[in-house]
Amino acid sequence: MLDLPFSSEFMLRALVGGSLVAIICAIVGTWVVVRGMAFLGEAIGHGMLPGVAIATLVGAPPLWGAAISGAAMSGAIGLLQRRGRLSWDTSIGLLFVGMLSLGVIIVSHSRSFATDATNMLFGDILAIGWGDIATLSVALVVVASIAVAFHRSFIAAAFDRRVAHTLGMRPRLAHTLLTALVTIAVIASYQSVGSLLVVGMLLAPAVAAGRWARSLPSTMALAAVFGIAAVATGLTVSWYAATAAGPTIACTAIVFAGLSALTAGAWHRSRTARAGHLGAESAPAHRTAEPAAA
């Protein structure tokens, strides 16, 4: 009897959980690409390490530590910006290095972190349980609700903050909520692909979809399709090739983004060439018709 990947319950749980992560990352990742917030996603991903390490040491659920540490990271970024008069990227850079260093110090202080450190960086999607899937479902509802409720504010703040302020759309609140969405997405993706690879799931499907979609909602929907396809393909490859599931999924998503770029480029060149060929064929007929009309 053929041993199929998703005939096993743990693989099925990984597929369902990974698909939920893909949808969350599709919604948030589209805004990350539009707003150029990739560095924030990476910083929050690494900023979770101290919380996860401390939670592991005291025997608490690592996801709680990740949530507390990630929330503290995003809050500290906003505080440094407002009170420290620092730029956005400078605030992120300082806290990124500080939190990452603190996480490494905590991990290096204990010899029991050999396996846990790997899980923190690369995730363990095959260990996802139905309780984790329920948590991801709640996170998806929260992310989708905020994205829908503040869609116009996000658009206005993304393209012209002064106009957004004039229209009463509160661009600072929109920016804070976007930061919160990135934080939720990173925390939700932590167990599946880890803090090191979460940026790949945020960016790659959105970049792949952006080559074909013409609006933000359609980009999000297509990014979700690319993300779910990356999860299913990555899990299948890891099953047969005996590779780590999380990194395989992230790598597959990036491969899809590359293939999408190549395919879209070839498609657009083909359409341009056809349009030019049809224009060249119709031009002589138009010129010969003019004297007859005269």
Image (tube, rainbow, N blue to C red):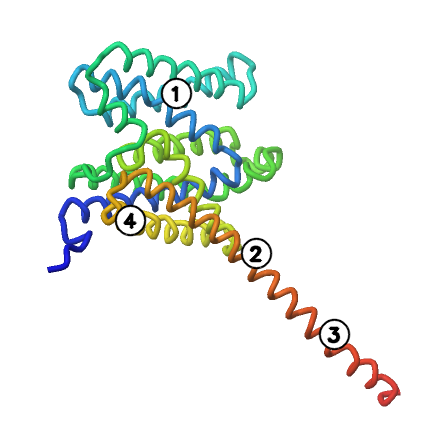
The answer to the question of whether label 1 and label 2 lie on touching residues, with beta carbons closer than 8 A, is no
Marks 1 and 4 sit apart, C-alpha to C-alpha, by 35 Å
Amino acid marked by disc 1: Met
C-alpha gap between disc 4 and disc 2: 27 Å
Mark 3, mark 4: which one is toward the viewer?
4
When asked about the image quadrant of residue 112, the answer is: top left
Residue that carries the numbered disc 1 in the rendered image: 73
Q: Residue furthest front?
A: 241
Q: Amino acid at mark 4?
A: Val
Q: Nearer the viewer, residue 252 or 159?
A: 252
Which is more foreground, mark 1 or mark 2? 2
SS class, disc 2:
helix
Identify the element where label 4 is drawn. helix
Rendered-image quadrant of the N terminus? bottom left
Q: Residue at x 37, y 35 (%)?
A: 198
Sequence-wise, which precedes: disc 3 or disc 2?
A: 2
Q: In x, y percent, where is residue 220?
A: 43, 49
Q: Quadrant of the C terminus?
A: bottom right
Residue 121 is situated, as x and y percent measured from the top left of the image, at 32, 28
Mark carried by residue 265? 2
Label 3 CA crowd tier, 10 Å (few <14, some 14–19, many 20+): few
* Numbered disc in front, either 3 or 1: 3
Q: Residue at x 19, y 25 (%)?
A: 61
Q: Which mark is residue 237?
A: 4
What is the spatial separation of the Cα atoms under label 3 and label 1, in whole angstroms?
Answer: 59 Å
The residue wearing badge 3 is: 280
